[in-house]
Image: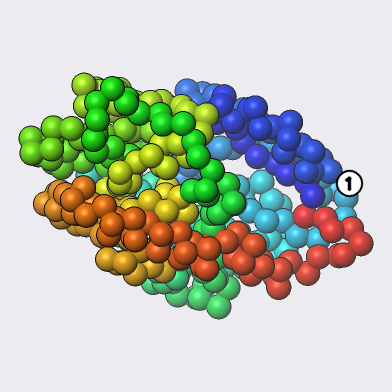
Amino acid sequence: MYLGTFVDDPDDEKYVPFVRTLCKKSYFEKINKNNSKIQSLWGLIKGNALTLNYYNSSIFHDWVKSVVRDNRIDAIVIFSSVMAQFVSKDFHSRMLVDFVDVDSKKWNEYADKKPFPLSWIYRRESSYLLSYEKYVALSAKHSFFVTENERNIFSDYVPESISKTSALNNGVDSDFFCPNVLFPVPFDTSVEKLTQIVFTGAMDYWPNIDAVVWFVENVFSVLIKTYPNSRFYIVGRNPTQAVLNLNSKTIFITGTVDDVRPYLQHATVVVAPLRIARGIQNKVLEAMAMAKPVIASTACVNAIDTLDGVEILSAETAMDFIQRIIFIINNKKEAKSIGNSARSNILKKYSWEFHLKELDKYLDINVAGNNL
């Protein structure tokens, strides 16, 4: 296997040596975010999606070209449509693309929540990126989206792509995210009977930022008045200033942690109040795998094959979240049952091995060379 990828966070670099052992040849390119942002602005002049320019790299192009030239490559698997720019046109017919989400629609949703001129830039990005997504989907051998709903959204935009796309769900490592291993409590234990509410995710990702700010302002600020022993932990790397500003005696911003499992395991409840949610949220699957009761926005719940009220709790408004959190606080037996049912759901429906088998029928790999 040959692997080319970007590394945009220094914390990820510690995994590079291990990943290299899995590959015959690999290339990791560090991203300088400030330089990439400046580079992306060329898209305004060149008339293409800013995202394409953000990730464009002549060195990366040359590495892919040399691998294809010097080796018998049977297939190229692309993760995220913008990475298709590194594959030459004569190889598109053997390209499998995992779009995950319809990113162009996400940019349009961002535009709805931003003032001018950002709203104009985001709508432009949505339009230009959709044109590129269409080109990639129609050029590739086959493409995948994380849910059937995401696939249908794309098909509405590009109806001619329907025969060349499939849904390929996310999975979770249920052996790693397992409640049977006891982790030390990461919370303050000086106060008894605390309600620990946990949110996990990359905290430089705007939908996550929007989610926690909204939750603090509209849910937690109300809840804390009736349940003063409540604590809210925002667990994730690279918190922006907007997130750091939430820090208080009852709200904790952890930044990067070595392991999110202790926070999940000892949480009273895990929340995912995303107002912009494309596809399946891994943070939700991981919490469910840890047998925790999860309260998530309706969009997050609808993306998962799960029973609302049995394996997860959905919420739309601030009052929905408040009422469901209070239910979890006051009904420990039911909360435990929801967590156990969530774990069972993950084991049945969201193993990586089960989902990735869907790729096999499209690979047509030369068994002797096994090159991709």
Image position of 296 (left or right of 180): left
Q: Residue furthest right?
A: 368
Q: Residue at x 13, y 38 (%)?
A: 227
Residue at the (46%, 31%) spot, across then down: 184
Residue appearing at x 60%, y 59% in the figure: 352
Q: Position of residue 121 (x, y in %)?
A: 32, 41
User: Viewer-proximal residue, 132 or 230?
Assistant: 230
Secondary element type, mark 1: helix
Q: Nearer the viewer, residue 317 or 64?
A: 317
The picture quadrant where one finds residue 147 is bottom left
Task: Estimate the x, y position of residue 245 in percent, counting from the top left.
Answer: 24, 22
Q: Viewed as shown, does residue 93 lie left or right of 307?
A: right
Relative height, residue 55 to residue 344 (above, below): above
The amino acid pointed to by label 1 is Asp
Q: Quadrant of the C terminus?
A: bottom right
Residue identifier under label 1? 70
Residue 58 on image: x %, y %: 68, 34
